[in-house]
Image (spheres, rainbow, N blue to C red):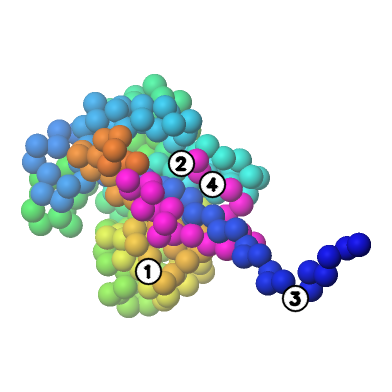
Amino acid sequence: MTADTSSRPARALPRRSQPWILTYHSVSDPTDDPYNITVSADRLDEQLTWLRSRGLTGVGVAELLNARARGQRGLVGLTFDDGYADFLDEAFPVLLAHGCTATVFVLSGRPGGSNAWDPLGPRRPLLTEEDIRTVAAAGMEVGSHGMLHRDLTALSDDELRRETQGSRETLNRVVRQAPSGFCYPYGTVDHRVVEAVREAGYAYGCALAPGALSGPLALPRTHVSHSDRGARLWAKEVRHRLRHRSPGTGGWPGDAG
C-alpha cells in the first residue's frame, strides 16, 4: 500500500554557494602596501599550491561560469584587478607553473599609465596595449575595469556609459574581442550601474560585496592579501559559502569544490 504523502511538507530545495572567485591586484614586493593589495610571487605560488592540493584549479571567470553551467566542479575563479604590469613578469609564470589561468581586469583608458587613483601610492605601472595583447594571446581572459578607475555609482549617465560601453569598445579594438566580463572599481555597484553594464553587452560583472544584488552581473569575490595562507584561505572559503548561497533551481549548477 502506497503511503499518502500529500500532507507532508515539501523538502527544501538544496542550496549551493555561488562561484568562489579570488581577487588579486599587484604581484610584487608587499613591503610598501598601504591598501593591502599586494602579494609576492612566492606567496602567490604558496596560495596556488594550497588550492591545487585541495583539487582546485584556478581559471578565468568566463571559463568558471561556463564550466559550472555544464556541471563541472573543482574550479575556482582567479582575477587580477587594475591590470598592473607586474602581472606579466611575476604572476603569469606562477599561474603557468600551476596549470592555471585567470581574468585580468584592465583599465582601457590608462594603458601604460599608473595607479594615479591611489593617493597613498606607491606608484605602479600598468599594462600597455601591447602587454594586454600579450596577456590575451597567452590564454588569459581580459576583462574591463572601466576606463579610469572611478566610482561608477557617482557618475552621470553619460560618464557611466563611457566607463562601461566605451571601455568595452576600446578593448575590442585592442585585443580584437569584446570582453564578456566587467569589474566594478572599488567594488562599488548599485542597480543603475548593473543596468549600464548589462546594456553595454557584458555577460557578467564582478563586485566584492554586492549586498542585495545578485546574479551573474553582481558576482561576489574574496579579497586575497599577502597574509593569506592555508588556514586563512580555508576560513575565507567557508565564509564565502555561508554568505553567498542561492536556491538550487535558480542558482549555480555546481560547487567550486
Q: CA distance from mark 2 to mark 1?
A: 21 Å
Q: Nearer the viewer, mark 3 or mark 1?
A: 3
Q: Identify the mark nearer the N-term, 2 or 1.
A: 2
Q: Identify the mark nearer the N-term, 4 or 2.
A: 2
Front one among 92 and 235:
235
Badge 3 is on which residue?
7
Q: What kind of element bears circle 1?
A: loop
Residue type at mark 1 is: Gly
Q: What kind of element bears circle 2?
A: strand
The answer to whether marks 2 and 1 mark residues whose Cβ atoms lie closer than 8 Å is no
Which numbered circle lies on residue 229?
Answer: none
Badge 2 is on which residue?
76
What residue sits 30% from the left and 27% below the top? 45
What residue sits 38% from the left and 49% below the top? 238
Q: CA distance from mark 4 to mark 1?
A: 21 Å
The image shows residue 181 at horizontal and vertical percentages of 46, 53
Q: Is residue 82 above or below residue 243?
A: above
Q: What kind of element bears circle 4?
A: loop
Which numbered circle lies on residue 211?
Answer: 1
Q: Identify the mark nearer the N-term, 4 or 1.
A: 1
The answer to whether marks 3 and 1 mark residues whose Cβ atoms lie closer than 8 Å is no
**Would residue 105 be counted in the magenta stretch?**
no
Badge 4 is on which residue?
255
Residue type at mark 3 is: Ser
Residue type at mark 4 is: Asp
**Residues shaded magenta:** 235-257
Q: Identify the mark nearer the N-term, 2 or 3.
A: 3
Q: CA distance from mark 4 to mark 2?
A: 9 Å
What residue sits 65% from the left and 45% below the top? 70
Farthest residue, direction right: 1
Residue 4 sits in which quadrant?
bottom right
The image shows residue 14 at horizontal and vertical percentages of 60, 58
